[in-house]
């Protein structure tokens, strides 16, 4: 690689000068080696969940007067409980219908915009992947305070 | 010893016909050819930019265990340093040390107590150690559960119950971070 500068007439010496790229290539090689060693190929993260559906500290509303939103996960599918209303969301074949659950949760959130807490109540046989996807769907619907409980502890 | 002006020459033993021809025919062209490094430097620069984008300064807080396949999630938060409870299809571990076998968790306890005693005791020790080492800090009670996709809630709830009774009420589930588009998550 060179830098070309047009010289005037009568100059014998060329004005072309070569840039010394060796230090630059050295630096790039060292950076590539360092970054390859420290590279993180799998991004691990977390989903938070409380263990009980207790109210927030400082809340004065008695528990029986609070509106409870619960997603029951069982072998048949989901059952979204908003207060006294229940919306069963059966499986699509063998797969859980997360799309419909998301739609129903968004409706529930639009109906109760101040409500941020939700309970995910699971049966014993439900696998972890389904629970995570259910919690992820609830987080997508802006329910940020998630509790994971047993169906018996949900109190429905 | 006479001093000669330096010039290009080859040893007779080297049988480089093309180079010899150039040297012996007194051509004006130099035998030295400059390597074109532009493409090489472009490639290196792109590589550095890509690696810098995937660089994480936080380090590895969690290691992927070979017998655990973690689920994916889109609405994730960054990991914190906390005790890691691993749940594979065979064993339950705490920071890599086995504390229970999964067969035991699948059975209903005769006493009705869902607590895993070894896990509970080790978590209590960790909690006490934290309080001793950080006397001014408030104990946050965070534990990370790194469970396999196929683990049933029956086993999971026993682990969660054991953690809660030991004082670890804030349970975080380790997941593979995915972006909304379904690709790899952007680094923070």
Image (cartoon, coloured by chain):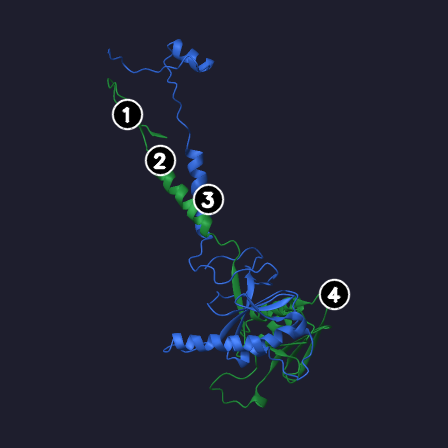
- Which chain has been coloured green in this picture? A
Q: CA distance from mark 2 to mark 3?
A: 18 Å
Which tint was used for chain B? blue
**Lower position in the chain sequence, tag 4 or tag 2:** 2
Residue receiving disc 2: A22
As helix, strand or loop, the secondary structure at mark 4 comes to loop
Query: What kind of element bears circle 2?
Result: helix
Q: In terms of image quadrants, where is residue A141?
A: bottom right
Marked residue chain, label 4: A
Q: Position of residue A151 (x, y in %)?
A: 66, 80
- Give me the C-alpha separation between circle 1 and circle 3: 33 Å
Do badges 4 and 2 share one subunit? yes
Give the vertical position of B78 relative to B27 (above or below).
below
Q: Is residue A135 among what the camera can see?
A: yes
Sequence-wise, the earlier of marks 2 and 1 is 1
Picture coordinates of residue A60 (x, y %)? 49, 89
- Cα separation between marks 4 and 3: 44 Å
Is disc 3 on the same chain as disc 2? no
> Do the numbered discs 2 and 3 sit on residues whose CB atoms are within 8 Å?
no
Which circle's residue, 1 or 4, is located before the other in the chain? 1
What chain letter is assigned to the residue under label 2? A
Apparent side of residue B107 relative to residue B176 in the rendered image (left or right): right
Q: Is residue A113 at all visible to an observer of this figure? A: no
Residue under label 4: A94
Classed neighbour count for the residue bearing mark 4: other residues with Cα under 10 Å, few (<14), some (14–19), many (≥20)? few
Q: Which residue is mark 3?
A: B47
């Amino acid at each position: 690689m060179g830098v070309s500068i047009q010289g005037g007439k009568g100059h014998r010496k060329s004005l072309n000068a070569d840039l010394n790229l060796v230090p630059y290539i050295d630096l790039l090689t060292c950076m590539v080696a360092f970054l390859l060693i420290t590279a993180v190929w799998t991004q691990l993260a977390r989903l938070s969940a409380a263990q009980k559906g207790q109210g927030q500290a400082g809340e004065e509303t008695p528990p029986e007067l609070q509106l409870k939103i619960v997603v029951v996960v069982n072998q048949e599918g989901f059952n979204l409980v908003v207060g006294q209303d229940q919306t069963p969301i059966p499986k699509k074949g063998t797969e859980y219908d997360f799309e419909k659950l998301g739609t129903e949760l968004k409706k529930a959130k639009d109906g109760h915009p101040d409500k941020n807490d939700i309970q995910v109540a699971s049966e014993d046989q439900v696998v972890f992947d389904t629970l995570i996807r259910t919690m992820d769907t609830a987080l997508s619907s802006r329910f940020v305070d998630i509790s994971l409980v047993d169906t018996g502890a949900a109190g429905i | 010893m006479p001093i000669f002006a330096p010039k290009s020459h080859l040893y007779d033993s080297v049988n480089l016909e093309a180079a010899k021809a150039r040297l012996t025919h007194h051509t004006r062209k130099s035998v030295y050819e400059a390597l074109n490094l532009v493409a090489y430097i472009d490639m290196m620069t792109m590589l550095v930019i890509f690696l810098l984008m995937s660089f994480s300064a936080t380090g590895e807080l969690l290691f992927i265990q070979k017998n655990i396949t973690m689920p994916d999630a889109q609405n994730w938060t960054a990991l914190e340093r906390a005790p890691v409870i691993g749940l594979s299809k065979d064993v339950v571990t705490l920071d890599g040390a086995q504390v229970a076998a999964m067969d035991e968790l699948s059975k209903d306890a005769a006493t009705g107590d869902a607590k895993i005693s070894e896990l509970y005791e080790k978590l209590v020790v960790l909690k006490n150690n934290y309080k001793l080492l950080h006397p001014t800090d408030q104990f946050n009670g965070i534990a990370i559960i790194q469970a396999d996709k196929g683990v049933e809630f029956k086993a999971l709830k026993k682990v969660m119950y054991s953690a809660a009774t030991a004082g670890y009420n804030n349970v975080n589930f380790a997941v593979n971070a995915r972006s909304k588009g379904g690709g790899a998550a952007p680094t923070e």
